Amino acid sequence: MQLPSAFKTKYQHLLGEEAPAFLKVLSTEESVSGFRVNPLKKVLPQETINKAEGKVPYVPTGYYGQVNGKSLDHVTGWLYSQEPSAMYVGEVVDPQPGEKVLDLCAAPGGKSTHLISLMKDQGLLVANEIFRKRAQVLAENLERWGTRHTVVTNESPEELEKQFPHFFDRILIDAPCSGEGMFRKEPAGIEYWNPDYPAECANRQRKIIASAVKMLKPGGVLVYSTCTFAPEEDEQNASWILKNYPEMRMEEIKAYPGMDHGRPEWADGNPELAKTIRLFPHHIKGEGHFISKFCYGSAPVVDSSKKKGRKKKKRQNKYGLSKEQQQLFNDFRQTIIPDYKANKLILFGEQLYDLPAGISEIDDLNILRPGLHLGTFKKRRFEPSLALAFALKPEDTKKSLEIGREQWRRYVHGDTFTIKEQLPNGWYLLICDNHPCGFGKLVQGTVKNFYPKGLRF
């Protein structure tokens, strides 16, 4: 890989004697792959773990190694392919069950899936992405992860701050950046890099930070991270936070072997910046990352004028179900998942969702996933969703059907298949090797396929 000459000159100056090792690793060695297992599932994906190249020492659910994107473990959300250095960000955020958490720049979803796992899928996670297509990928990844308490939004930080003044216990800004730390993994990033690009990114990042601070509760935690080496976007932005928000206090982050502390001399010399963490690929098995953590110490004054200025929709039953729809879902629930207790059923078009507790006003938000997608109402029937299947454990349903690997392959291909057992017609949760993998409708011994067409392979 050919690094830009200006990039090499910059880091030769910054790193001094370390520069040759740093530049050699970036230029000649391959990127490091990894994956996290999903603790929300019933058992570990042992089939994939057995092929791993070792454990990631700073992430209890992390492993080194490649993942087959078409494997049963991956397709059913039992693991997530993620670069090892990036995994440490979620551990630093350290969200607790029951908290309200915001992942402000969340696509494609690696850190969001990590956060909701640490929360044990309890509380509220708002995962936001400003770009629509990336937000759709984010929603798909969170659905596969099987989370019930996540809302996916497609908003700018400026719009979100109007909706959630001093609302969140923890906020993660994994900021869009110059991407220097991912050059090995995504070499295309080299093409748009130039010496001024990090400074341009830093200016955009500060606007995002300003919005995030307005959404943080007193005593709340803000984690700001990037996947770049650039001091303009790293220590200098951390220093900017301390200068512009005196109520923010820098928190110490544990440095595991191979991790470096931040470099105060690359900013304004504030010794507090040494509490940040850098992950360099010539020191640790992974790509480049920077992580800083702050606590919001003083009580902010909430400007309620913005909340009063929002336009409220007058239709009280905008998201409500008709009596027929309510009956259709109740019939399905009592037959298939009798112990399922919804928080709040809402309807988007013909799509039924379970809105998590902790969020009520959604009219003014661009939302892609307002909680768990339960299914679709069609003419005089209710069809359960793939997201609901991924959110269930085998013991959660009264009607399940064990299928083999070959039947699963037919299912994800979109084909029907037959079974030998004599079972009543109707909906069944399909389970392959303990993995809930979707719903099928049994009709006279044939399982009709409802796997989404866009996901078939």
Image (spheres, grey):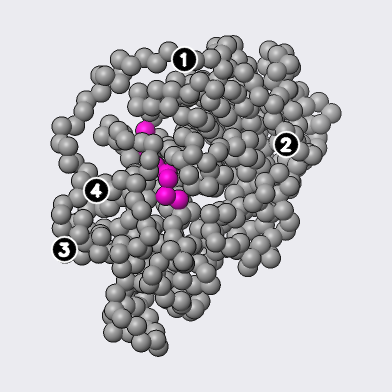
Q: Which residue is label 4 attached to?
A: 347
Q: What residue sits 53% from the left and 47% below the top?
A: 120
Disc 2 on helix, strand or loop?
loop
Q: Is residue 337 visible?
A: yes
Q: Which residue is label 3 attached to?
A: 379
CB contact under 8 Å: marks 3 and 1: no
Tell which tag, 4 or 2, sits nearer the viewer: 4
Q: Is residue 149 magenta?
A: yes
Res. 6 image quadrant: top right
Cα separation, mark 3 vs mark 4, equals 15 Å
Q: Quadrant of the N terminus?
A: top right
Q: Is residue 207 visible?
A: no
Q: Residue 276, position in %: x, y? A: 68, 26
Sequence-first tag of 3 and 2: 2
Q: Is residue 144 magenta?
A: no
Q: Which residue is label 1 attached to?
A: 300
Work out whether residue 180 or residue 288 is closer to the camera in this orientation and state it. Answer: 288
Q: Which residue is label 2 attached to?
A: 280
CB contact under 8 Å: marks 3 and 2: no
Q: Residue 25, position in %: x, y? A: 75, 42
Q: Circle 2: is it few (<14), some (14-19), or many (20+) Cα within 10 Å?
A: many
